[in-house]
Amino acid sequence: MTDDPNEAPEVVPIEPGPHGPPRLPVNKITWPQIGRVTEPGRYMFTFGWLTVTAEDLAVWEQFPNAAFTLFRTGTTTEAGEEFRLGAFELPENLSLSEK
């Protein structure tokens, strides 16, 4: 993972180890990382299909720097895995224009 906020995180499956189930990484994704989409829908990205809802877009319109948790839905198609957006967090250092 890089420090570039515009670069999408790479989603890598974790194989179970000999000492119990793996700890799952928490992947966050921001609006710029998905190209600032403006319509709800299902979009293909390098990590798979992402469904963006009107509610997700409403959060990003109000808080453009919000980072959503990326959730795998458990559905896999020939074109890749399916993801949706979960809980979001706001950066701690918001400028006045972002509040």
Image (cartoon, helix red, strand yellow):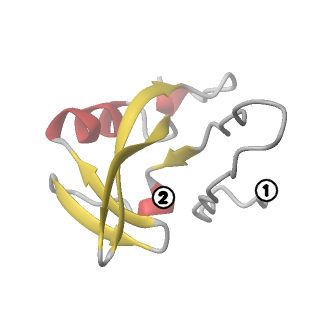
Q: Residue under circle 2?
A: 32
Q: Residue at x 84, y 32 (%)?
A: 19
Residue 71 appears left or right of 90: left
Please report the residue visible at 79 percent of the width from the left and 43 percent of the height from the top.
Answer: 17
Q: Which residue is mark 1?
A: 3
Q: Position of residue 64 (x, y in %)?
A: 43, 41
Q: Where 98 falls versus 32 (above or below)?
A: above
Disc 1 element: loop
State left or right for residue 21 relative to residue 6.
right
Task: Give residue 77's quadrant in the image.
Answer: bottom left
Residue drawn at 55 percent across, 25 percent down? 90
Rendered view: 74 above or below 34: above
Q: Position of residue 26 (x, y in %)?
A: 63, 36
**Viewer-proximal residue among 61 and 85:** 85
Q: Residues within 10 Å of mark 1 (few under 14, many from 20)?
A: few
Q: CA distance from mark 2 to mark 1?
A: 14 Å
Residue at point 25% right, 52% down? 51
Relative to 96, is 45 on the left or the right? left
The answer to whether residue 6 is left or right of residue 79 is right
The one of 92 and 80 positioned closer to us in this rendering:
80
Query: What amino acid is found at the position of numbered circle 2 in the picture?
Result: Pro
N-term mark: 2 or 1: 1
Location of residue 57 in the rendering, given as x and y in whole percent from the top left corner = 25, 42
For the N terminus, the quadrant is: bottom right
Look at the picture and state if 11 lies above or below 88. below
